[in-house]
């Protein structure tokens, strides 16, 4: 049999690796369903990196295995290999190509981060980067009153120092408090408090996140979003749920023995269902306010 | 503190002359100043801790076989995971790679008779047993339960006594590591044999140089962080108590300012081992000596500016997340240079598949997987989803187990003859390699999926949807536990009754192979003179046999 | 190489030679490396202090103000002691052991006065370690520095103790003297930064 020229081999290998990488980038099935506007952004970015990673892995591992076979010691050969100490062009290539890849990835991640609303915590674009609203002075009392008895302090402006989320103005605002080992969701405008999160679909939701005792982390895998709840710092998360259904809310930061059991659910409703849920609970939790229900439900 | 150690006199230590000709077994339990003996002390000590930490992991994996917390109490689970992480890092990889191989090899490789400050060296080692005792002892007080990261406020309100012991233990280990690093830097700068130019220093030594500089720059910050934590727990201060004005985020910065560089502390010496093992067993000069040296330094430098990638979901301003995304990604470039250089070293070689070489090649492949998953984590948008999930656990076991542990095994197979004068059994070594490779992949590969699908880390109970994948991981962990047996049998049997090793069984060119196996007490009767570079394989007229015969 | 003398003899010869010439800068280099690392410990404390300073509306908070006179006097004493200790070093470079002893005694004394002043300040400030975050920082930082001063005094006393032996320190051989001096300068520089951070910045608030 005649020996195939090296260039054909290289070409074939290149095509195969590219095909596998492309396929893996699109069909890895690693993620759960996408239920927020942010999720596809994250997934697409990850899939791109996964594709690059698969290609790089196949190339590196393939080369190693090929060399292992090709350059194994033959029986009886006690000599040394080729005394080659380097090759400038080759080294320049494998420094520059990865450098280009990581620069592209860096730019792309700033892009994705911006698109996800990462630069807009604190009420839609306010510059809170260097501002410090350290709330320790009334931390303790505030936390207790927030969770036990929502009152006037709730309507006070919530200054999130750090956060993440969509750039749109929020349609629904919920105060989230993490405590060992539960999440408390409070709807300040309606004076409703619940153990699960209920939100309308396709509306911008703003979560104002606090912690009552230790650090927790609010995570909805289907939304691809996570934000720590940090005692002493207010954080926020803004997003738009895009699929009706219910999804797990997971605490992702070690918070004690039952950290693993700190789970609840988020219910994404249609607007009507959501209004209905809100009205029922508003009525049940504030019997004296029954008159106001209709007004709010209308909004 | 350490200052008391500084010698105030200029009296010369009178070392030579009154030595015994070889150390006895009981010398290994004493305050001995010989760097080789100290190196072996570090290695054996840390391997015992590896078994302890591994046992903890096996118990954890057993618990995770089912979704409910039915095997052990969740608080005990947290204590186990905290101490598993702590022991593996501060009790196994760091002391074995830096203390063990660093001490044994650096003076031998640069043609010195000992480290620059032998007594300081012994002192640094003897800080570790008390540190280890503190950690193990903390279990009698419930064990520290806040994870190896010990974020306040959780670490301030759980198991106070045990947490305090944990702090002290790490501060001790850290001090030991600072003293050790001072010693390495001075030794390499001042004590190379006169004939050795900087660009003839073996790459392992360069790796130790980068490691030491990194340790010197980052460890003090951890010491302060843990001291403040200790004060908060015991002396009523409130640095990290939010309800009294403290700030929990500051702790995270202090912690990661050390602990991110710490991951490079754990991989750079291993990279050094790779650069020694691969050329010898491939019979090739190392490809790109200068690039490898340079990349160590670049990793060391950039490694100091990426720590916030562990805090993408903490209170971190957006510009910071972006800055640290980019800096984190950049580390992939120098690391890639190393990976590619080793791969190119294989090209045109005559590769001997010794156990050492198998572990080195296994490392190459496993580490690339871990490194690439690290790159995905390095980008803030993706990390927002992945942070604190099993995807992270998968990432760091690939780099730590598939990287550091494989590298330590490669090093042990390579230098065991030098350390003990006995050859390890090769067939047993290959069984060990296969079991480890298979076990590691069964255990850690599926964890990626757990993470992306939604399983957080550090949980004793989890959503039943993850049961099957967890069971695969647990089975893998049992395979890993089993894989230690051929290794232990091999080491014990070979050390006692193994085939005798010659001075240079692999026909290698670095200086440690120019003396006897095990080396005599002051390493050489007459210091060797360099006649060639450390990796000049295949060049005519530079046969390794020459230096072995003329200098020993 | 075949006719070399008894190898072990040669080894010993080589080693003592190496020691004479090299051991000196070994130690100095080791000390400097160590101090470089050590300064990052203080660096971390300074960073913590500055972060808190940026966060609090008033820093130092009310009722935990610092006083200025005593620390200023203390600063003058410590800074001048750095010059004093240098006289000691200059003396031994001329082989003057008595001069060395004199100046090192004075330095140790000044260090002790500094520590005394610090203790007095602690006793009269009216607030303790746990009062608030500022007090936490204040006591931890000055205490940690004080510990270093204390160790510095011990080193100086060590030099003085050894200097009793005739010929122990000479114009050529006095590395221990120099190391104690370098360490003392280090402690001094750290204090200047500390003083600026804690006391001077408080004035600017
Ligand atoms: C040996 C230890 C080690 C090493 C070497 C690394 C290496 C890297 N790590 Fe990892 N890491 C850990 C140990 C380590 N890590 C540990 C223990 C944790 C968890 C801590 C905890 O929370 O408990 C962690 C966590 C961790 C996180 C935080 C995750 C989270 O909690 O959310 C991140 C995020 O950026 C990260 C990134 C990286 C990157 C980018 C590298 C890079 O250095 C990798 C570079 C290597 C490669 C990229 C592969 C080879 C290169 C090529 C083949 C060239 C071409 C490549 C490209 C062009 C991409 N690591
Ligand atoms: C170098 C570091 C290193 C190494 C080698 C390992 C090795 C292993 N680790 Fe690792 N692990 C960490 C570092 C490491 N780990 C860190 C830093 C964390 C994070 C901790 C935290 O979150 O705070 C972690 C967390 C961690 C978790 C996540 C826990 C959680 O988040 O809930 C899990 C779960 O599976 C795990 C499993 C394992 C397994 C199965 C091994 C196996 O490789 C172990 C194999 C077992 C052995 C090799 C020993 C077997 C020996 C015997 C059974 C005999 C014993 C006999 C005597 C003692 C006499 N580890
Ligand atoms: Cu709350 Cu974990
Ligand atoms: Cu890191």
Image (spheres, rainbow, N blue to C red):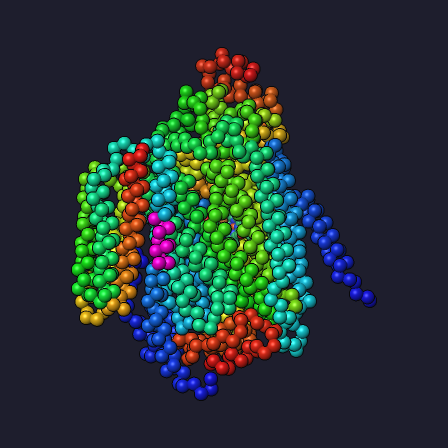
B57 or C19: nearer the viewer:
C19
The image shows residue B517, relative to residue B38, as above or below, that is below
Residue range (magenta): C32-42
Looking at this view, name the residue that lies furthest to the top: A291
C56 or B45: nearer the viewer:
C56
Q: Quadrant of residue B20?
A: bottom left
Q: Quadrant of the N terminus of chain B?
A: bottom left
Taking the image as shown, residue A112 lies to the left or right of residue A285, namely right
Measuring 55% from the left and 67% from the top, which residue is drawn there? B277
A114 or C128: nearer the viewer:
A114
Q: Is residue C39 magenta?
A: yes
Measuring 56% from the left and 55% from the top, which residue is drawn there? B335
Residue B539 visible in rendering: yes
Measuring 41% from the left and 62% from the top, which residue is drawn there? B185
Taking the image as shown, residue C159 lies to the left or right of residue B505, namely left
Q: Quadrant of residue C51?
A: top left
Q: Residue B63 in the image: x percent, y percent? A: 50, 49
Looking at this view, name the residue that lies furthest to the front: C94
The image shows residue B58, relative to residue A119, as above or below, that is below
Q: Quadrant of residue B44?
A: bottom left
Q: Main secondary structure of the magenta part?
A: helix
Residue B424 visible in rendering: no
Measuring 51% from the left and 21% from the top, which residue is drawn there? A281
Q: Residue B425 in the image: x percent, y percent? A: 54, 73
Q: Is residue B82 magenta?
A: no
């Amino acid at each position: 049999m005649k020996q195939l020229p090296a260039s054909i081999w290289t070409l074939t290998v290149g095509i195969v690796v590219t095909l596998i990488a492309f396929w893996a980038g699109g069909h890895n099935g690693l993620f759960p369903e996408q239920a927020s506007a942010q999720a596809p952004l994250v997934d697409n970015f990850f899939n791109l990196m996964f594709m690059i990673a698969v290609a790089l892995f196949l190339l590196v591992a393939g080369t190693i295995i090929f060399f292992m076979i090709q350059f194994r010691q033959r029986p009886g050969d006690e000599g040394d290999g080729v005394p080659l100490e380097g090759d400038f062009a080759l080294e320049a290539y494998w420094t520059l190509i990865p450098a280009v890849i990581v620069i592209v990835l860096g730019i792309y991640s700033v892009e994705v981060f911006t698109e996800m609303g990462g630069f807009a915590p604190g009420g839609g674009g306010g510059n809170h980067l260097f501002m410090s609203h350290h709330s320790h002075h009334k931390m303790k009392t505030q936390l207790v009153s927030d969770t036990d008895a929502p009152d006037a302090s709730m309507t006070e402006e919530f200054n999130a120092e750090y956060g993440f989320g969509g750039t749109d103005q929020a349609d629904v605002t919920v105060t989230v408090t993490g405590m060992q080992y539960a999440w408390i969701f409070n709807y300040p405008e309606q004076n409703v408090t619940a153990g699960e999160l209920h939100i309308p679909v396709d509306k911008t939701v703003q979560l104002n996140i606090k912690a009552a005792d230790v650090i927790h982390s609010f995570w909805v895998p289907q939304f691809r979003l996570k934000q720590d709840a940090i005692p002493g710092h207010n954080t926020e998360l803004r997003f738009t749920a895009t699929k009706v259904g219910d999804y797990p809310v997971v605490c992702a930061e070690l918070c004690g023995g039952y950290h693993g059991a700190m789970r609840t659910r988020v219910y994404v409703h249609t607007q009507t269902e959501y209004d209905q849920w809100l009205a029922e609970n508003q009525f049940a939790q504030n019997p004296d306010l029954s008159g106001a229900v209709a007004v709010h439900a209308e909004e | 503190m350490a200052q008391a150690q500084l010698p105030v006199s200029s009296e010369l230590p009178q070392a030579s002359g009154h030595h015994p000709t070889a150390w006895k077994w009981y010398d290994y339990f004493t305050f001995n100043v010989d760097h080789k003996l100290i190196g072996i002390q570090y290695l054996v000590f840390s391997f015992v801790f590896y078994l302890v930490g591994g046992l903890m992991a096996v118990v954890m994996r057993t618990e995770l076989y089912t979704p409910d917390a039915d095997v052990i109490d969740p608080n005990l689970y947290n204590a186990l995971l905290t101490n598993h992480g702590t022991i593996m890092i501060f009790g196994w990889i760091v002391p074995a790679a830096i203390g063990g191989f660093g001490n044994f090899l650096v003076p031998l490789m640069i043609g010195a008779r000992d480290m620059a400050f032998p007594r300081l060296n012994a002192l640094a080692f003897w800080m570790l047993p008390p540190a280890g005792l503190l950690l193990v002892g903390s279990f009698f007080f419930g064990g520290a339960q806040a994870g190896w990261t010990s974020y306040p406020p959780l670490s301030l309100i759980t198991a106070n006594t045990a947490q305090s012991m944990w702090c002290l233990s790490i501060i001790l280990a850290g001090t030991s590591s600072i003293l050790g690093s001072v010693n390495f830097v001075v030794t390499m700068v001042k004590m190379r044999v006169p004939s050795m130019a900087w660009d003839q220093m073996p790459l392992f030594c360069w790796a130790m140089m980068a490691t030491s500089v990194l340790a010197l720059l980052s460890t003090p910050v951890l010491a302060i962080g843990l001291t403040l934590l200790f004060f908060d727990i015991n002396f009523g201060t409130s640095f990290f108590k939010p309800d009294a004005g403290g700030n929990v985020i500051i702790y995270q910065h202090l912690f990661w300012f050390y602990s991110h560089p710490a991951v490079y502390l754990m991989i750079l010496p291993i990279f050094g081992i790779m650069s020694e093992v691969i050329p010898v067993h491939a019979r090739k000069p190392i490809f790109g000596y200068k690039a490898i040296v340079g990349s160590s330094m670049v990793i060391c430098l950039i490694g100091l500016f990426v720590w916030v990638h562990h805090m993408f979901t903490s209170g971190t301003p957006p510009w910071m997340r972006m800055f640290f995304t980019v800096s984190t990604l950049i580390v992939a470039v120098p690391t890639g240079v190393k990976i590619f250089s080793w791969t190119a070293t294989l090209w045109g070689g005559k590769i001997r598949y010794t156990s050492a070489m198998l572990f080195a090649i296994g490392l190459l492949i496993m580490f690339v997987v871990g490194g690439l998953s690290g790159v995905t984590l390095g980008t803030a948008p993706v990390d927002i989803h992945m942070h604190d999930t099993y995807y992270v656990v998968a990432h760091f076991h690939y780099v730590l187990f598939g990287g550091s542990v494989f590298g330590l095994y490669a090093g042990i197979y390579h230098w065991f003859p030098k350390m003990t004068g006995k050859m390890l059994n090769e067939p047993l070594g290959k069984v060990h390699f296969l079991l480890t490779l298979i076990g590691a992949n069964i255990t850690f590969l599926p964890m990626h999926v757990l993470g992306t699908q939604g399983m957080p880390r550090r949980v004793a109970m989890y959503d039943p949807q993850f049961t099957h994948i967890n069971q695969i991981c647990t089975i893998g962990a049992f395979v890993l536990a089993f894989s230690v047996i051929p290794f232990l049998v091999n080491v014990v049997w070979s050390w006692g009754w193994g085939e005798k090793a010659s001075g240079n069984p692999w026909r290698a060119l670095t200086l440690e192979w120019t003396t006897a196996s095990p080396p005599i007490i002051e390493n050489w009767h007459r210091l060797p003179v360099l006649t060639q570079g450390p990796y000049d394989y295949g060049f005519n007229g530079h046969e390794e046999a020459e230096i072995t015969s003329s200098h020993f | 190489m075949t006719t070399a003398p008894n190898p072990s003899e040669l080894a010993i010869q080589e080693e003592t030679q190496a020691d004479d010439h090299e051991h000196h800068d070994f130690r100095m280099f080791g000390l400097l490396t160590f101090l470089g690392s050590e300064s990052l410990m203080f660096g971390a404390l300074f960073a913590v202090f500055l972060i808190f300073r940026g966060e609090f509306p008033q820093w130092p908070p009310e009722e935990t103000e610092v006083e200025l006179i005593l620390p200023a006097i203390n600063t003058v004493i410590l800074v001048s002691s750095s010059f004093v200790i240098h006289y000691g070093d200059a003396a031994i470079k001329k082989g003057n052991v008595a001069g060395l002893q004199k100046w090192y005694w004075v330095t140790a004394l000044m260090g002790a006065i500094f520590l005394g002043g610090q203790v007095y300040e602690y006793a009269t400030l009216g607030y303790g370690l746990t009062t608030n975050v500022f007090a936490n920082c204040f006591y931890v930082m000055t205490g940690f520095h004080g510990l270093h001063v204390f160790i510095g005094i011990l080193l100086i006393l060590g030099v003085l103790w050894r200097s009793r032996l005739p010929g122990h320190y000479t114009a050529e051989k006095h590395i221990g003297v120099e190391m104690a001096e370098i360490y003392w300068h280090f402690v001094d520089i750290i204090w200047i930064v500390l003083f600026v951070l804690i006391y001077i910045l408080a004035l600017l608030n």
